[in-house]
Image (spheres, rainbow, N blue to C red):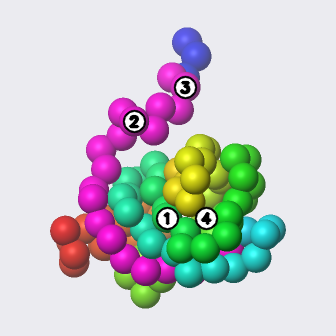
Amino acid sequence: MQPKPFDPRSRKRVLTMFACVARSSAGAAPATVMNLSTEGLCLRNDGAALARVGDRIEVASERVGRLSGTVYWRRGDTVGVRLDRSTNTAAKIESHCRAYC
């Protein structure tokens, strides 16, 4: 049996808004996390384009620490990031939700 393909729209997301710094091969820039799930996040950049689809990206903030993933989609100044799966990532997101959601 083959695993289901990744479908970011099927995941339960928490609407949120907090500042972060996003880093990719293009450099680092301030950004805003718009929504969050254990699978990924939506990130809006307030300046030049941060990353292209397929690029690795790291998001750092006081609320969730550091999260890493791959840009899955991009529309203008907004990107969807598929997070690297780990128990540490899941714990950071659950902690954020308990404190802020």
Q: Secondary structure at mark 4?
A: strand
The residue under the point 49% across, 64% down is: 44
The residue to which callout 1 is attached is 44
Seen in the picture, residue 24 relative to 56 is either above or below; the reply is below
Q: Residue at x 58, y 53 (%)?
A: 76
Between the C-alphas of marks 1 and 3, the distance is: 25 Å
Q: Amino acid at mark 1?
A: Arg
Q: Who's the residue at 76% across and 76% down the image? A: 27
Give the image location of residue 48, x and y in percent: 67, 70
Element assignment for label 2: helix
Q: List the residue tagged with mark 2.
A: 9
> For the residues carrying marks 2 and 4, which lies nearer the camera in this image?
2
Q: Nearer the viewer, mark 3 or mark 2?
A: 2
Residue type at mark 3 is Pro
* Residue 92 location, quadrant: bottom left
Instruction: From the viewer's side, name the closer residue of 89 and 60.
Output: 60
**Amino acid type assigned to the residue bearing label 4 in the image:** Ser
Between 80 and 61, the residue placed more toward the observer is 80
Local SS, label 1: strand
Q: Which residue is mark 3?
A: 5
If you read the primary sequence from the N terminus, does the residue marked by circle 1 or circle 2 appear first?
2
